[in-house]
Image (tube, rainbow, N blue to C red):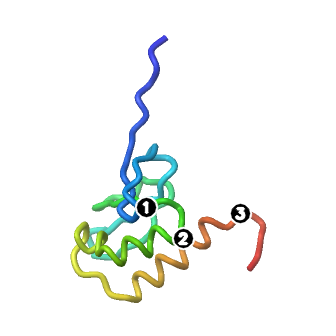
Amino acid sequence: MVQKKIPMRQCVGCGASRPKKELVRVVKNAAGDISLDPAGKKPGRGAYLCPDPACLAKAQKKKALERAFGAIPPEVYESLQTQLAQAARPEGTKE
């Protein structure tokens, strides 16, 4: 039996290469809105991050998402931070 190839992607924050399913896709759609795409299916330009708020902070410091998408306002980073924290929280728990 032939083993299926696992697609790999690189985190723009820490630079680690991981299987695509272990990373969270950040997408910029045609309207210019930037959001998380946990399913990885939304149309638009994408970049990948580890599901760790520290990697988002590293990406912000290195301006990695700006290189991928162009200028990004600070409130978009705050929104991504909130979305990432919610995505990382296990189901059924409240903060």
The circle on residue 49 is 1
- The foreground one among 6 and 37 is 6
Q: Residue at x 54, y 65 (%)?
A: 52
The image quarter in which residue 70 lies: bottom left
The image quarter in which residue 29 lies: bottom left
Secondary structure under tag 1 reads: strand
Which label sits in the foreground, 1 or 3? Answer: 1
Residue 51 image offset from top left, x and y in percent: 53, 62
The first of marks 1 and 3 along the sequence is 1
The circle on residue 90 is 3
The image quarter in which residue 82 lies: bottom right
Q: Residues within 10 Å of mark 3 (few under 14, many from 20)?
A: few
Residue 85 image offset from top left, x and y in percent: 59, 73
Amino acid at dot 1: Leu
Q: How crowded is mark 1: few (under 14 residues within 10 Å), some or many (20 or more)?
A: many
State if disc 1 and disc 2 touch (CB < 8 Å): yes
**Label 1, label 3: how far apart the Cα atoms are:** 18 Å
Q: Residues within 10 Å of mark 2 (few under 14, many from 20)?
A: many
In the depicted structure, whether residue 73 falls above or below residue 46: below
State if disc 3 and disc 2 touch (CB < 8 Å): no
Q: Which residue is drawn at 40% across and 83% down?
A: 76
In the depicted structure, whether residue 44 falls above or below residue 75: above
Amino acid at dot 3: Pro
**Label 2, label 1: how far apart the Cα atoms are:** 10 Å
Amino acid at dot 2: Leu
The circle on residue 70 is none
**Label 2, label 3: how far apart the Cα atoms are:** 12 Å
The circle on residue 84 is 2
Residue 35 image offset from top left, x and y in percent: 42, 71
In the depicted structure, whether residue 74 falls above or below residue 58: below
In the depicted structure, whether residue 33 falls above or below residue 38: below
